[in-house]
Amino acid sequence: MGPDDIVLRVEDIHKKFGEKVVLRGVSFSVKKGDTVVVIGPSGTGKSTLLRCINQLTPPDMGRVFLHGEEVTNSGAKISYFRQKIGMVFQNFFLFDHLTALRNVEIALLRVRKMDPKAAREKAVYELDQVGMSDWADHFPAELSGGQAQRVSIARALAMDPEVILFDEPTSALDPELTREVLEVMKKLARTGLTMVVVSHEMGFATSVASEIIFMEGGRIVEQGPPHILMSDPAYPRTRKFVSQFADLAGQRKE
Amino acid sequence: MDTAPFITTVLVPALTQGLVITLQLIVLAAPFGLLLGIGIALGRQYGSRGVSVLCKLYVIFVKGCPLLLLLFILYFGLPSVGITLSAFAASVIGFILCNAAYNSEYVRGAILSVKDGQMVAAQALGMTRQQTIREIVLPQALRRAIPGLSNEFIYLIKYSSLAYMLTVIELSGAGKLVATKYFAYNEVFFAVGLVYLALVSITTAAVHILEKKVAVPGLIS
Ligand SMILES: Nc1ncnc2c1ncn2[C@@H]1O[C@H](COP(=O)(O)OP(=O)(O)OP(=O)(O)O)[C@@H](O)[C@H]1O
Ligand SMILES: [Mg+2]
């Protein structure tokens, strides 16, 4: 594995809001085709970390690189990096006034300035990838949460990103709908998409993650391959956290 | 007084002339009132601190000033600082300034109702601030503002009669002149009232069609 295989590198990210320190030096890197799952207690800075990566929240300190190019302090070039770093949100944030198809198409037209015909074809293709092509003409209000989330994944995919950041993509969904979204994400992972996923879906993490990162108090406490982090974590805190969620998942299946 | 010839040879021609002026006032004032209103709303919401404060002061000033006084300032006051406007131009400008102030309030309210997350999502896709406002915020905000904006348009139809106070012989003024000359107040004002009612009804119907046309499920419009 040479350095060329590193898609995303995050170096010593610090962030505070006012007096409240949220990130205290977070570093990690993601190799091409990897799925890194980030877990950790609420308020620990997971969402903030993702937002620091694409500069929706500029970090106070530290740097982010995409294929070796600096994303932090990139000025007007940030629009380019944001196209290459997709993001999927807990609450989907689809554009309410646009159909599913238009949601996927709009950035192709306005940001990538694609030719309308090519943009339309690509949008249809991406909706098909997430199993939503039959719903192309429906508006967000007419979609279930799972369907809306799949459209939002298609919207991110359409930009041909190098990596997609998922911030608790299934936390707002019922178990049934969670499953359909996770299926799509598993498929993407298999097709070699590079992903950073904040999620407490332990089943997904165990089966798909190349690496699990356990964060607490604005730091990475522990990281490693799923079989180690899940079964034999070095830190008692990780053990406790993981078992809590494993229990929860177990209860829900019954 | 013979009723039939009075109506065909006096009333209808006079009111038609007046109506043409009224329509000119409205057609010139409404689009600029809308554009300026949107501009002020955007300035308040997204402008620098200075711009935002300026826009807010503008709204406070215009809302606090009787429209008639605003028209008097434009027509009688401005010449003393070297700006002379025709009565018609002063009326149109006054209506634009007034219409824009109220429109901006509706648009701003509607902008605030667009969920933040969508703007974040747009930026995450690489959209610039301007693109986000143009492609995501305004299309939603304007749909939501249609009821308020159309109310303002209906007010404009009616307060365009204030142009008569600057000697513009629009619909109400034309009616007043005929009524006085022929001493037929009730008949003439009833007829004038019917014309305004027709204008307002047409507007209401048109807005209804527009709302249907741009309706989006889940977005109140
Ligand atoms: N824009 C902001 N302004 C002020 N404080 C913020 C802001 N964004 C996040 N915070 C605070 O930073 C802390 C970390 O928030 P963050 O959302 O990153 O945590 P999280 O790990 O994603 O939690 P959760 O699991 O609940 O989503 C929280 O205490 C939150 O209140
Ligand atoms: Mg979060």
Image (cartoon, rainbow, N blue to C red):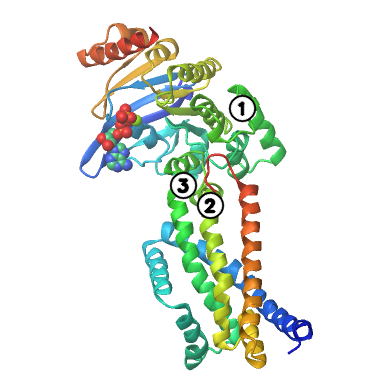
Marks 1/2 in contact by CB < 8 Å: the verdict is: no
Residue picked out by circle 3: B114
Residue B189 located left or right of residue A24: right
Asked if residue A57 is positioned above or below residue B56 in the image, the reply reads above
Q: Are marks 1 and 3 on the same chain?
A: no
Residue picked out by circle 1: A127
Amino acid beneath label 2: Leu
Q: How far apart are marks 2 and 3 (CA)?
A: 9 Å
Asked if residue A148 is positioned above or below residue B38 in the image, the reply reads above
Q: Mark 1 or mark 3, which is nearer to you?
A: 3
Residue A140 located left or right of residue B51: right
Asked if residue A9 is positioned above or below residue A234 in the image, the reply reads below
Amino acid beneath label 3: Val
Residue A2 lies, in percent from the top left, at 46, 20
Q: Residue A87 versus residue B115: which sits nearer the camera?
A: B115
Residue name at image x 42 percent, y 67 percent: B55
Residue name at image x 44 percent, y 27 percent: A166
Residue B200 located left or right of residue A178: right
Residue B97 lies, in percent from the top left, at 50, 73
